[in-house]
Image (cartoon, grey):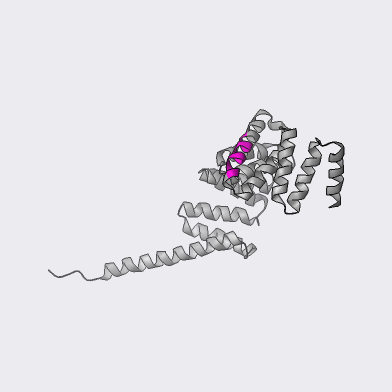
């Protein structure tokens, strides 16, 4: 509240101070006031159309609100952000690329996310080759249909951090898509040994158990058919 008062005093002196509006947007978001935050970030972009941080924050809020009227605006802003990245890729730090990639994944633009994340993991910065960046690349590749590359990225994550549960979940999902049921169950077991309460892994474990029941029922049915005596004519 006190921080908000300080920024509002700044705006009394300089109503066009973009950074003060940006910080008020950040504060509103932290306080659980998304509509107010949207308004502040919108003002920032009116004052400075090249303010990438405000644009990404606004995209995130519009995506989260899930209103029909917000979809077009969010997509237009996201395409503007992609254009800015392509024109000046060096202007975005690793944390900015991560945020952009997450927005692209949430928007279903997985091919664009792959390009951004490949740039991120190839950078010589200290955070570019970390497990989370590689994990996001694995997610983007798998969602784009590049299953072999996605699984290899997940394996790289696990070589860096052997207890990284999301990568194990991705490996299991990729195995399910490839109908490699035993391998899928193996990765689920490994993940649940580390975190038995992980919601995504629990759902996948249930799915695999159901498949096992169906598979057993199918085997039993086929076995009974083979043993059934043929009709005498």
Q: Nearer the viewer, residue 72 or 200?
A: 72
Check if residue 74 falls in the magenta segment.
yes
Residue pushed farthest left?
A: 233
Point 72% across, 46% down: residue: 37
Q: Indicate left or right for 184 with 59 as reference.
A: left
Point 36% across, 66% down: residue: 219
Point 51% across, 64% down: residue: 206
Q: Quadrant of the C terminus?
A: bottom left
Inspect this view and state whether residue 61 appears. yes
Q: Nearer the viewer, residue 70 or 26?
A: 70
Point 56% across, 41% down: residue: 109
Where residue 5 appears, x then y in whole percent?
Answer: 85, 48
Give the residues in magenta.
Answer: 69-79
Above or below 37: residue 224: below
Where residue 78 appears, x then y in whole percent?
Answer: 62, 38
Check if residue 31 falls in the magenta segment.
no
Where residue 139 appears, x then y in whole percent?
Answer: 58, 47
Q: Indicate left or right for 113 with 46 as reference.
A: left
Inspect this view and state whether residue 124 appears. no
Label count reads 0
Instruction: Answer with the quarter of the image where residue 92 lies.
Output: top right
Above or below 72: residue 203: below
Instruction: Answer with the quarter of the image where residue 101 lies.
Output: top right
Q: Indicate left or right for 233 with 117 as reference.
A: left
Where residue 215 appears, x then y in whole percent?
Answer: 41, 64
Residue pushed farthest front?
A: 12
Majority secondary structure in the magenta region: helix
Q: Nearer the viewer, residue 163 or 80?
A: 80
């Amino acid at each position: 509240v006190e921080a908000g008062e300080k920024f509002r005093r700044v705006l009394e002196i300089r109503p066009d101070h973009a950074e003060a509006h940006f910080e008020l947007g950040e504060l509103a978001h932290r306080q659980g006031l998304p509509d107010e935050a949207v308004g502040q970030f919108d003002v920032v972009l009116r004052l400075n159309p090249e303010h990438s941080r405000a644009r990404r924050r606004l995209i995130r809020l519009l995506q989260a609100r899930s209103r029909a009227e917000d979809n077009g605006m969010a997509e237009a802003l996201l395409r503007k952000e992609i254009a800015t990245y392509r024109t000046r890729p060096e202007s975005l730090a690793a944390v900015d690329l991560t945020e952009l990639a997450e927005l692209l994944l949430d928007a279903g633009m997985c091919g664009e996310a792959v390009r951004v994340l490949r740039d991120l993991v190839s950078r010589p910065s200290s955070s570019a080759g970390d497990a989370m960046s590689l994990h996001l690349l694995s997610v983007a590749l798998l969602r784009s249909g590049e299953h072999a590359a996605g699984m290899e990225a997940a394996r790289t994550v696990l070589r860096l951090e052997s207890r990284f549960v999301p990568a194990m979940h991705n490996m299991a999902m990729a195995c399910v898509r490839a109908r490699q049921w035993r391998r899928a169950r193996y990765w689920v077991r490994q993940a649940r040994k580390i975190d038995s309460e992980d919601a995504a892994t629990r759902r996948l474990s249930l799915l695999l158990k159901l498949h096992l029941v169906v598979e057993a029922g199918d085997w039993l049915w086929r076995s009974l058919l083979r043993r059934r005596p043929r009709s005498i004519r």
